[in-house]
Amino acid sequence: MNALFNQYLIGTELTIMIVWFYSLISVILVSFISLIGVLTFLLKEDYLKKILLYLVSFSAGGLFGDVFIHLIPEVIEEFGFGINGSILILSGITVTFIMEKFLQWRHCHIPTSHDHPHSFAYMNLFGDSIHNFIDGLIIGGSYLTNISLGVATTLAVIFHEIPQEIGDFGILIYGGFSKSRALFFNFLTAIMAIVGVIIALTLGSLFQDVNQYILLFSAGNFIYIAGSDLIPELHKEEPILLKSSLQLIAFVFGIIIMLSLVFLE
């Protein structure tokens, strides 16, 4: 009996170590994406805008795919779903709405210019720090459920962080930051994801089933970002059949990537 109990403890400790390892590696990877903003100086502005629109389409598909293919089905399968689940999803939507309304911060993916102004640079840094902290919570909560869900959610976060970080970098430059200072501060805000994942995993060790609350809150957060910020970005240009078709393809491809992860589990 003691031998079986010891094996159980060793197995549990090993599982916890694996979850911490994967979670920390994932948020470190996400944090380093903040350095991608340097692309704004390597590519011409018109070309960059074209690329970003397709990245935004792909990102929207990836976020919706993660919500409806991974996050919500995982919660339903493990915990069931009722009015409390609906309230948690609505809470995720509401908190993200509050961030944008009261912090004057939003998921902007178009380089800032005189024709496309943005909120003050320091305000954007503050809002981005909270956003990255939430990303850390989301990634940690996903890995608490299982590794495959953690990988899928990490990919969804990466998809929307790439165009987001390019936009954030442009905001800081437009706000008077030097290139090196903009990269440094953008990276500092990205590190908040590490803080978020540590808190999520710590809560997971203290409270049972905390991951279901994080996952449903995350679903609301992703739904708001994809539906309120990303898709409207695609409607700002005058519709052209070829561009619209390519955006649709990118959107569907983002969903397909999330769907393909189901068959790899």
Image: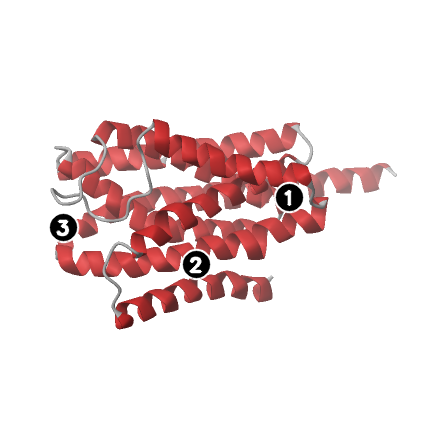
- Name the spot of residue 144 as percent of width and height, x first: 60, 42
Task: Name the foreground residue: 141 vs 191.
Answer: 141
In which quarter of the view is residue 89 placed?
A: top right
Q: Which mark is residue 15?
A: 1
Q: Is residue 152 left or right of residue 246?
A: right
- Residue placed under numbered mark 3 in the picture: 41
Mark toward the viewer: 2 or 1: 2
Farthest residue toward the front? 238
Task: Name the foreground residue: 23 vs 10.
Answer: 23
- Name the spot of residue 238 as percent of width and height, x first: 23, 61
Query: For the residue labelled by badge 3, is the local secondary structure a helix, a strand or a loop?
Result: helix
Mark 1 and mark 2 in contact (Cβ < 8 Å)? no
Q: Which mark is residue 138?
A: none
- Residue placed under numbered mark 2 in the picture: 61
Question: Which callout, 1 or 3, points at the residue further toward the start of the chain?
Answer: 1
Circle 3: residue type: Phe
